[in-house]
Amino acid sequence: MINLENKNIILTGATGGIGSSIVDTLTNLKSNLLITGTNEKKLEELKNKYKNLISIKQDISAHDELESFIDKCSQELDDRIDVLINNAGITKDNLTIRMNKDEWDKVININLTSTFLLSKYVIKKMLKKKSGKIINITSVVGHTGNLGQVNYSASKGGILSMSKSLSLEYAKKNITVNCISPGFIETAMTEKINDEYKNQLKSKIPLDKFGSPQDIANCTAFLCSDLSNYITGETIHVNGGMYFS
């Protein structure tokens, strides 16, 4: 039922575990996908795997370059951006009293400020066509908080609130803004967690397991599709039941 043929989609953070699954899913659904990231080798690997993929290396922390980056994306996509997926993000974990300002600033600047700016510049393009979708990948810790992640939790919580405001501002222009909030997903990040702490986390998940990147990709595909046209300002929780909003 999900048909993304001829949908022009931009995906940030394409080279991570979740990003790569989103790439696989959206390209298999025949979308026109433009991906970005900072890992040039992985970007090239994805481009070689999918011949119709457009790849642009871009550091989204370079805020003064983002408007021209979106202009370039628009040109590559024949002046029509249907969907922006803000997936890129970083962590710099530390307890609050040990966290320095640089650790705070880097996480806020990439996770929150870059998402704001990319959304702003894409909305300018979408307004011309009077349609579009923005999908922001957030996190369960943006709702619950987490030890040692005051910066990350703040950035993801900020995205949630920002997305609601954006959805209100541009709903009448047929631009929808929604979030996907993953719980604990099997990625390189969770592989670093020791077994004892993993078991503690799983005990809080009613489904008794971590999710897979494909779980997030499936939800992303739905929100990219016309099946989600009447949904805006919402957060879809993909967390195995560990948190209910």
Image (cartoon, rainbow, N blue to C red):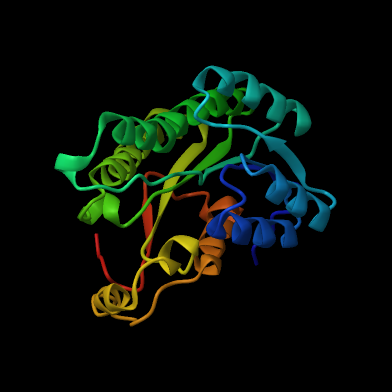
Residue 122 shown left or right of residue 205 in the figure: right
Which residue is drawn at the image coordinates 66% and 62% (left, top)?
25
Q: Is residue 208 above or below residue 122?
A: below
Q: Is residue 129 above or below residue 212?
A: above
Q: Quadrant of the N terminus?
A: bottom right
Which residue is drawn at the image coordinates 27% and 29% (left, top)?
101
Residue 185 shown left or right of residue 130 in the figure: left
Q: Is residue 235 visible?
A: yes
Q: Residue furthest right?
A: 51
Q: Residue furthest left?
A: 97
Q: How many marks?
A: 0
Q: Residue 92 sits in which quadrant? A: top left
Q: Is residue 232 above or below residue 67?
A: below
Q: Is residue 185 visible?
A: no
Q: Residue 203 sits in which quadrant? A: bottom left
Residue 223 point in image, percent of width and height:
53, 54
Residue 211 point in image, percent of width and height:
44, 72
Q: Residue 217 sits in which quadrant? A: bottom right
Q: Quadrant of the C terminus?
A: bottom left
Residue 149 point in image, percent of width and height:
26, 49
Q: Is residue 156 above or below residue 117?
A: below
Viewer-side residue, 97 vs 78 = 97
Which residue is drawn at the image coordinates 77% and 31% (left, top)?
76
Viewer-side residue, 171 vs 98 = 98
Q: Residue furthest bottom?
A: 208
Viewer-side residue, 50 vs 121 = 50
Residue 129 shown left or right of residue 169 in the figure: right
Residue 138 point in image, percent of width and height:
39, 49
Which residue is drawn at the image coordinates 59% and 58% (left, top)?
221
